[in-house]
Amino acid sequence: MADAGTEIKQSGPSKRAEKVLSAAFVRSVTTPGKYTDGNGLILKVDKSGAKRWVPRIIIRGKRTEIGMGGASLVSLAEAREQALENRKLTRAGGDPLQAKRTSQALLTFEEASRKVHKIHKPTWRNKKHAAQFLSTLQTYTFPRIGKLKVSEVTTADVLAVLQPI
């Protein structure tokens, strides 16, 4: 039986029916759980109500999940498109997870921090928490390690930033 907002779609000779999520369902769902869209794309809803896209793929024989971002930032169509690209890359022998890690390693600490802030901002209870998070980073971390590449940040750097706080 399909969840409200989803329809059952039979694709080809497969014995399993494929659930297809709708954009309205993605916007309105608040019940914690995993909701499949088919072809390995999953919408995970946390207890806090936060929603994120996770495509499930097989890399070198091992099933892996790759975070794609929150449903508030990534639309259903974009999530489907990215999941399809990831599947094509793995079928060709590539590793989308490694490609993601490589691209993230090129970010500076400040760029990565701002990206994390943007992703989590919709999940905070109010604007004050979002502002405090960013203000603390701007005061304590960006002046010391903001220009370093994420891959270059050491434990000593993190300790040097945290001790004055």
Image: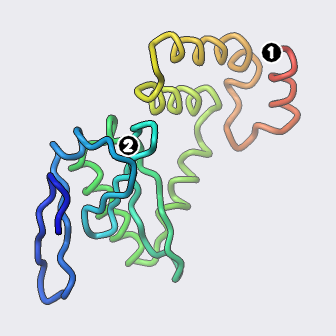
Question: For residue 14, which quarter of the picture?
Answer: bottom left
Residue that appears at 51% across and 17% down? 130
Q: Are marks 2 and 1 in contact (CB under 8 Å)?
A: no
Residue that appears at 32% across and 56% down? 82
Quadrant in the picture for the N terminus: bottom left
Q: Which mark is residue 61?
A: none
Q: Residues within 10 Å of mark 2 (few under 14, many from 20)?
A: many
The answer to whether residue 68 is above or below residue 88 is above
Residue 98 x/y as whole percent: 55, 61
Q: Please name the residue that numbered disc 1 is placed on.
A: 165
Residue that appears at 21% across and 82% down? 16
Q: Residues within 10 Å of mark 1 (few under 14, many from 20)?
A: few
The answer to whether residue 109 is above or below residue 69 is above
- Labels 2 and 1: the sequence-earlier one: 2
**Who is closer to the viewer here, 131 or 83?**
131
Quadrant in the picture for the C terminus: top right
Q: Nearer the viewer, mark 2 or mark 1?
A: 2
Amino acid at circle 1: Ile
Give the left or right position of residue 146, taking residue 60 as reference. Answer: right
Q: Please name the residue that numbered disc 2 is placed on.
A: 51
Give the left or right position of residue 162, taking residue 43 as reference. Answer: right
The answer to whether residue 151 is above or below residue 125 is below
Residue 161 x/y as whole percent: 81, 22
Residue 79 x/y as whole percent: 29, 52
Determine the secondary structure under disc 2: strand
**Who is closer to the viewer here, 87 or 8?**
8
